[in-house]
Image: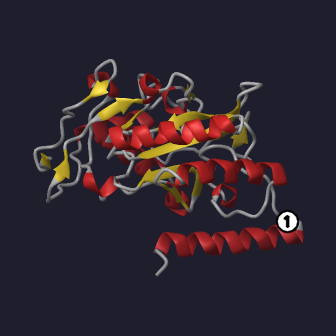
Amino acid sequence: MKSPNLRLSLIFLISSATLLQAGNFQPSQEISNGIFHLKPLRPVNELRAEALRATPPAETGQFRKPDLVELVKLDASIKLDIRYATDQNFLSTPMYSQARAFLQRPAAEALVRAQQKLRAEGYGVVIHDAYRPWYVTKMFWEATPDDKKIFVADPATGSKHNRGCAIDLSIYDVKTGREVSMPSVYDEMTPRAFAEYPGGTPEERQHRATLRTAMESEGFVINPNEWWHFDYKDWKEYPIMNVRFEELGSGGQSATRVSRTQRAVR
């Protein structure tokens, strides 16, 4: 059975294709210099203060002990373009104070294997986001209009990014060092972002397929709403975390703090 989000995505996809055929589809006016911008529903500073005071949702059951690994420590050829550490993101305001990327160790090692396969084809990975503290997910949700909420995670259930098992990425050409073109820009909240969007150029769709093939071969599952977002297969085995980058060590943290309502075992 298709999930509600997937069904909604398919509706948007069909509508998008119809508009394209009719010649009525217009580029989003919210994109400038390759960055999708969105006016937040409330001031970001207000949202940040509120989110930092909030508590992540309570979880029951048993989870693996978190073991976040800094990706560039495993493979120096991995590039970082952490937009949320700059103002070059959809809220036009830095969300992180440090440009770093972490995943749970099994997911991180799987990413390195995917990177090696891509290198054999002349590409490398460029990371836009990985582990994300829960409070940032809450900020994204509260800032985003209802008609675009299919592109952000509900903090009431948490994001797979919060579990250290989701990654946002693209690929770059090893010869030129430049990120390749895709059917949409990163974080674009339009049907062009959908994993099965039929538009764009043949080259852009091939780039998207190349990334997807490599990631899926190593246990990642694509988010149908976002071609750049992949979830690691074991995400359910890790708890929601709310640890800021400033609290993580130089290479990661093997005993990441979780909330008192959670138990981390194994």
Residue 17 in sight from this viewpoint: yes
> In the rendered view, how is the structure colored?
secondary structure
Q: How many labels does the image show?
A: 1
> Residue 110: horizontal and vertical position, in percent?
45, 43
Q: Is residue 77 left or right of residue 180?
A: left
Residue 89 in sight from this viewpoint: no
**Residue visible at 83% across and 66% down?**
20
Q: In this view, does 91 lie to the left or right of 193?
A: left
Tell me the quarter of the picture where residue 153 sits.
bottom left
**Residue visible at 79% across and 74% down?**
18
Direction bottom: furthest residue: 1
**Callout 1 amino acid:** Asn
> Residue 191: horizontal and vertical position, in percent?
67, 61
Residue 172 vertical placement versus 9 (above, below): above
Which residue matches tag 1? Answer: 24
Residue 13 vertical placement versus 123 (above, below): below
Tell me the quarter of the picture where residue 46 sits.
top left
Q: What element carries label 1?
A: loop
Q: Which of the pair 231/92 is nearer the observer?
A: 231
> Residue 111: horizontal and vertical position, in percent?
48, 40
> Residue 96: horizontal and vertical position, in percent?
42, 28
**Residue visible at 19% across and 33% down?**
255
Dot 1: few (<14), some (14–19), or many (≥20) neighbours within 10 Å? few
